[in-house]
Image (cartoon, helix red, strand yellow):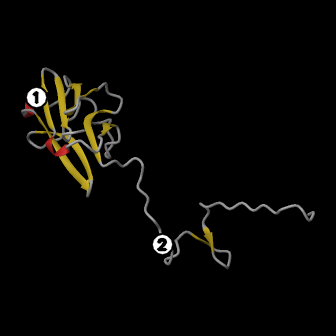
Amino acid sequence: MSMFAKKVTTVNPFAKKRSQHGVVSSTPNVNTKKQLWRLPHVFAKMLELPFPSDADISIEETPQFFRFVALCNKMSIFNAGGVRAQAIEILPGITKIVIKRFDGGDVAVAGQQEKRSSLGVDLWRFRLPPWTQPERVTAVCSGGKLVVTVPKIKGN
């Protein structure tokens, strides 16, 4: 090497740490403090509808509310007496709105129950802004349409 050449060393931050004896350890050092980062896919307020993620849902926004309308002709909710919206606090500060039948059962689109994974990954979701009020949400299924209304906080 010439006297002007620099030695370049690359470090992979994701590589497993090696001990002084050259043994790879997959367990982190107990003395290191890890910081938890907020995940970008976790939002404070979310609406989850019992439709596939690619469903055609119309969204209307006014100064007073958000309104979501979807066709529910193939839904098994009429024999259960209707639907209701329920705001569930998953963790402190994180709220999810889900649609349930009046008898407490899940609302499912015909033919989608077997396609849906156990985690519900293929459900239609919408991130709600902070100025919405999930605790005052309403859901109605009439005329072959599911209508979910999420009120906003006055002044926003």
- Counting from the top left corner in percent of width and height, residue 71 is at 22, 23
Q: Residue furthest right?
A: 2
- Would residue 121 be found to the left or right of residue 12 on screen? left
* Farthest top residue in view: 143
Label 2 to label 1, Cα distance in Å?
53 Å
Placement of 32 over or under 129, stated as above or below: below
Residue identifier under label 1: 78
> Considering the numbered disc 2 on the image, is that residue within a helix, a strand or a loop?
loop
The image shows a total of numbered marks equal to: 2
Choose between 24 and 64: the one closer to the eye: 64
Question: Disc 2 designates what residue?
Answer: 33
Q: Secondary structure at mark 1?
A: helix
Q: Nearer the viewer, residue 53 or 133?
A: 133
Percent x, y of residue 96: 25, 46
- Going from N to C along the chain, the mark reached first, 2 or 1, is 2
**Which quadrant: the C terminus?**
top left
Task: Tell me: residue 57, above or below residue 11.
Answer: above
Left or right, residue 39 beside residue 138? right
Q: Look at label 2 and name its amino acid.
A: Lys
Along the viewing direction, whichever of 66 and 118 lies nearer the viewer? 66
Does 130 sit left or right of 103 as displayed?
right
Q: Which residue is found at the position 23% from the left and 26% from the top?
A: 70
Q: Position of residue 47 (x, y in %)?
A: 26, 40
Other residues around mark 2 within 10 Å, as few (<14) / some (14–19) / many (≥20): few
Locate the N terminus and report the quarter of the image it occupies: bottom right
In the figure, residue 18 lies in which quadrant?
Answer: bottom right
Amino acid type, residue under disc 1 in the picture = Phe
Q: Give the number of the mark in front: 2 or 1.
A: 2
